[in-house]
Amino acid sequence: MNQPATTATGEAVVYAPIEKVDRFCRDVFGAIGADEATADAATRAMMHGSRLGVDSHGVRLLDHYVRVMEGGRVNRRPDVRIVHSFGAVAALDADHGHGALGAYSGMEHAVELAGQFGIGAVSIRNSSHFGPAGAYAMAAAERGFIGLAVCNSDSFVRLHDGAMRFHGTNPIAFAVPVENDQPWLLDMATSAIPYNRVQLYRSLGIQLPEGVASDIHGQDVRDPGQVEMLAPVGGEFGFKGAGLAGIAEILSAVISGMRLSFDILPMPGPDLSTPRELGAFVLALKPGAFVDEAVFRAGMERYVEVLRSSPAREGMTVMAPGDREWKVAEERRRIGLPLDPATRDAFAALAEKHGLTPPFAG
């Protein structure tokens, strides 16, 4: 049963069952002619974001993905293939397909390499919007490997003390399996917030926190409607965030031969027909190649146990990376996924156009 809530503007937020949202996304991709691999990867990545509370990179992106596929920017039936190999290293060409398909395919190959060599690194070229980086790091952790995933994107983040768009939000994700527990999962943008969060807050009528976004002159603003660029993560020490963004930039774009952030076409358009030539990078490590598996498992268990039980500041709670996400995932398993007004309207329009039933109906 759908559970309504309200945003800051008084508009209703609808909660839809996870299974229905998943099926709806797959059906929409099928209706526009996307192949099964694309529909599966794109839906899997969006559902990862929505289930874990990363709503900025969740199912609200479905409408955008449909538009770029119909416009020609993203190949609906790509020939994703390994084009170069050298020991534990490979290069994958995503054929301008959906970024999630390239990333999942790259990580699958990286895990295979790590199973053979202890480490596997795959550079991904001719990709598109990456989505939630944590989804691909998790794909390794779910198979008992340590996973790293990074990507660059069109520039929207100023440098520390800068006043122009330079880096993209350039996410970094790192996931580590933990015996009898959820993985240790870090999934962060190197900007103070992702731009999709700005769009989400605009839809919800919520002001941004201090110091996360700027106007055209690089001055801080809180109104999502005035945002022209984002700040790097780190606040007064934003040079650290800018440096981390540079690591993602080099691994994603420079070693793949793809476009640097400031050379990538903007995600929103207006050109939705020209491929954006994004790069990405994934890495898998086999713990048992470095130390006995039992020693690794004991070390991770000890690490997260002491982390979670360490003293907290008054009124605060210490959490391991990923704890908030697992808590949200459990809650949403029970109550469903929240669909903000803009996403609900987009779903309704897609359902009408393709003769489908929206996941919040009934």
Image (cartoon, grey):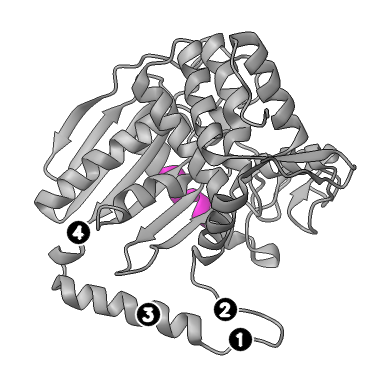
User: Which residue is at 55% across, 23% downward?
Assistant: 65
User: Label 2 neighbourhood size at 10 Å, few (<14), some (14-19), many (20+)?
Assistant: few
Q: CA distance from mark 2 to mark 3?
A: 13 Å
Assess whether mark 3 and mark 2 are in contact (beta carbons under 8 angstroms): no
- Type of amino acid at the residue the image marks with label 1: Ala
- Type of amino acid at the residue the image marks with label 4: Lys
- Residue 226's image quarter? top right
Looking at marks 1 and 2 on the same chain, the residue that comes earlier in the sequence is marked by: 1
Asked if residue 175 lies left or right of residue 264, the reply is left
- The reply to whether residue 190 is visible in this rendering is no
Q: Nearer the viewer, residue 276 or 303?
A: 303
Magenta-colored span = 244-250
Question: Which residue is tagged 2?
Answer: 318
User: Which residue is at 11% across, 52% downward?
Assistant: 117
Question: Which residue is tagged 4?
Answer: 286
Looking at marks 2 and 4 on the same chain, the residue that comes earlier in the sequence is marked by: 4
Q: CA distance from mark 1 to mark 3?
A: 16 Å
